[in-house]
């Protein structure tokens, strides 16, 4: 019956993975908005040097931060997928073993 506990843990991990995927989507959306703002600002200031423009630098740093956060969340999603697959295998093996024992003992 321990496979029932593993199935519950798998469900919890699946929920956590969904939350991480949602967070990843938000981060990528925000990154796209910032990138668009950077392009618009650069186009509006095409004759100026943006390397020392405080607003543009702020947008760059925000974009870099969001990309780093998105990469971190993506790696967490990958770990969760591995854990889910591992638990799925253990649950399936537990069910098979229980069924085999019932057939042999029955």
Image (cartoon, rainbow, N blue to C red):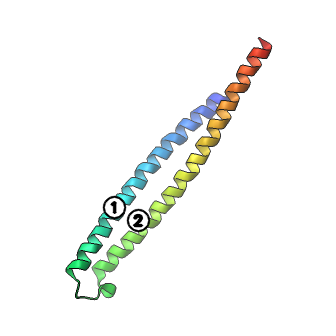
Kindly indicate the quadrant of the structure image that contains residue 8. Answer: top right
Instruction: Give me the residue at 34% from left, 86% from top.
Output: 51
On the image, the x and y values in percent for residue 83 come to 61, 45
Kindly indicate the quadrant of the structure image that contains residue 92. Answer: top right
Against 22, residue 7 (above or below) is: above
Q: Earlier in the sequence, mark 1 or mark 2?
A: 1
Give the side of residue 55 with respect to residue 80, left or right: left
Against 62, residue 74 (above or below) is: above
Give the side of residue 101 with respect to residue 42, left or right: right
Judging by the rendered image, the residue that carries numbered circle 2 is 66
Q: Secondary structure at mark 2?
A: helix
Kindly indicate the quadrant of the structure image that contains residue 3. Answer: top right
Marks 2 and 1: in contact by CB < 8 Å?
yes
Judging by the rendered image, the residue that carries numbered circle 1 is 30
On the image, the x and y values in percent for residue 58 come to 33, 76
Instruction: Give me the residue at 70% from left, 26% from top.
Output: 96
Against 23, residue 95 (above or below) is: above
Q: Secondary structure at mark 1?
A: helix
């Amino acid at each position: 019956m321990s496979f029932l506990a593993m199935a519950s843990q798998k469900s919890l991990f699946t929920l956590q993975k969904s939350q991480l995927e949602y967070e990843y989507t938000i981060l990528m959306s925000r990154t796209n908005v910032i990138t668009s703002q950077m392009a618009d600002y650069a186009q509006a200031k095409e004759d100026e040097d943006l390397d020392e423009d405080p607003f543009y630098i702020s947008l760059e740093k925000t974009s870099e931060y969001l990309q780093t956060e998105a990469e971190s969340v993506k790696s967490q999603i990958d770990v969760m997928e591995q854990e889910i697959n591992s638990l799925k295998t253990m649950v399936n093996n537990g069910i098979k073993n229980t069924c085999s024992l019932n057939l042999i003992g029955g």
